[in-house]
Structure formats: structure tokens, C-alpha cells
Amino acid sequence: MQIFTSETPLSWGNLDLPLCGMHEDWFGKSISPHMFTLAKDSESVWFISIFPNSAMIHPAAAPGHFTPELWKYDVAELFLANPTTGEYLEFNLTSNGAWWASKFSSVRVPSVLQPEFTAHIQTHRDLTDAQHSVVGLQIPVDFLKKEIDFGSITAANITIICDSPSQHYLSASKLPGAEPDFHQPIHFPTLLFTPHHSD
């Protein structure tokens, strides 16, 4: 899983990062591309997702607010895992900047003590495009180091749920299974830190 690194601090509104795309759902069906990117500077990890304005989001999703069960509707998801301990973090992000997060001690088992996500996480949204919403989740590196020892060993995956209510399930990394199951940290690839220099 590629993560672009910047020696200079990144800031919302001035991000110049390569985009990656998902073109097939879990079952190999071709769909309209869903674009995303993952980046890191000295202070933050940035998860950026581009949503069509037609995205159907949770009715309780308020811009910039922590909202449970976003995965029941259209959402972008970031998973970051520690392969040594089996712990991992899941972050959900919607087209209006609503978000949710949880720490898991093992597969689908939420940690008894949850981090204070709302004290650390920021979301951003760009509405200048008439057809798409560009949304970002900004996560402090120090926070990630504390929770999952973020660094060269970190494994990651990015997933998308789209086209609600019919729902298509997309995964940036190929995961096994006949039915969609994103909670497979043992199969997440290690982060590949790739230097990126803006022109």
C-alpha cells in the first residue's frame, strides 16, 4: 500500500498529490473509478477520497462530526494495522466530512479502551467541483505511533462502499473470500513510503 511522503508540511487547499483509483468491486465487476490517496508529512497522515456528489451517506452524518455506522451507506475506509500485535485502526469518511473511527484488539473485536479520536482527528472538504466532493482525514503521526506503533512495519488497506442502497464493495488490495470482508489485517500489505516532491 503506497503512502506518499513529503518533507514539507502539507496543508488542505495546497495538496498536490498523485491519485490512485479503484476500478473493480469485490466480485471483479467494472465500475466507475473511485479515486483516493494516502500521504504523510512530519506531523500528519492524510487520507483523501473523492466522492461523486450523488453519494448516499448516513442520514445522521453531520459535516466534520464523529458518526457511528457510516458503513451502512457510501463511505471510504482506511485501515492501519500492527502485524506484530494484531491491533488495528479503522477510519471511516463520508462525502460531507462526517467520520468515525475505532481501535480493534483483534479481528472485529473493538479494544476495551478506545483512543480519544475526537481530540486528535480533523476532517476537510472541498466543494469547488460541481460533480465531486474532495474530502480529507488528517491524523497526527504521534497519535498513530502511540496507538499502533505506526512506522515501517505498518500494514494498511483502503476500501470503499458505494452505490447505496445496492452497495458495491471495493478494496485497494485484493482480499480473499467469496463475500466482502474488509477486516482481514493479516492480508493487508505493508505501507510503502514513497517520497513525493511537488512541482
Image: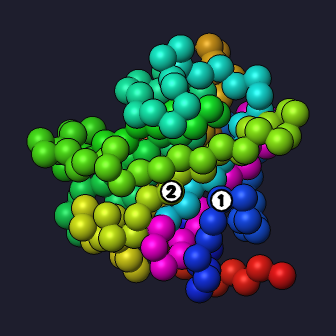
Is disc 1 placed on a helix, strand or loop? loop
Q: Position of residue 74 (x, y in %)?
A: 60, 27
Frontmost residue, 192 versus 51? 51
Q: Position of residue 90 (x, y in %)?
A: 39, 46
Please give left or right for residue 165 compared with residue 52 in the image.
Answer: left
Q: Quadrant of the N terminus?
A: bottom right
Q: Label 2 belongs to which residue?
A: 138
Residue drawn at x 27%, y 38% is: 108
Query: Would you call the spot at circle 2 few (<14 residues within 10 Å), some (14-19), or many (20 or more)?
Result: many
Please give left or right for residue 153 compared with residue 57 in the image.
Answer: left
Of the residues shown, which amino acid type is indicated by label 1?
Trp
Q: Label 1 belongs to which residue?
A: 12
Q: Is residue 96 visible?
A: yes
Q: Which residues are magenta?
A: 28-44
**Residue 146's quadrant in the figure?**
bottom left
Q: Main secondary structure of the magenta part?
A: strand
Q: Are marks 1 and 2 in contact (CB under 8 Å)?
A: yes
Examine the rendered structure and indicate whether residue 121 appears above or below residue 29: below
Of the residues shown, which amino acid type is indicated by label 2?
Gln
Examine the rendered structure and indicate whether residue 5 appears above or below residue 136: below
Residue drawn at x 31%, y 54% is: 88
Q: Residue furthest right?
A: 130
Q: Position of residue 21 (x, y in %)?
A: 74, 52
Q: Quadrant of the C terminus?
A: bottom right
Query: Would you call the spot at circle 1 few (<14 residues within 10 Å), some (14-19), or many (20 or more)?
Result: some
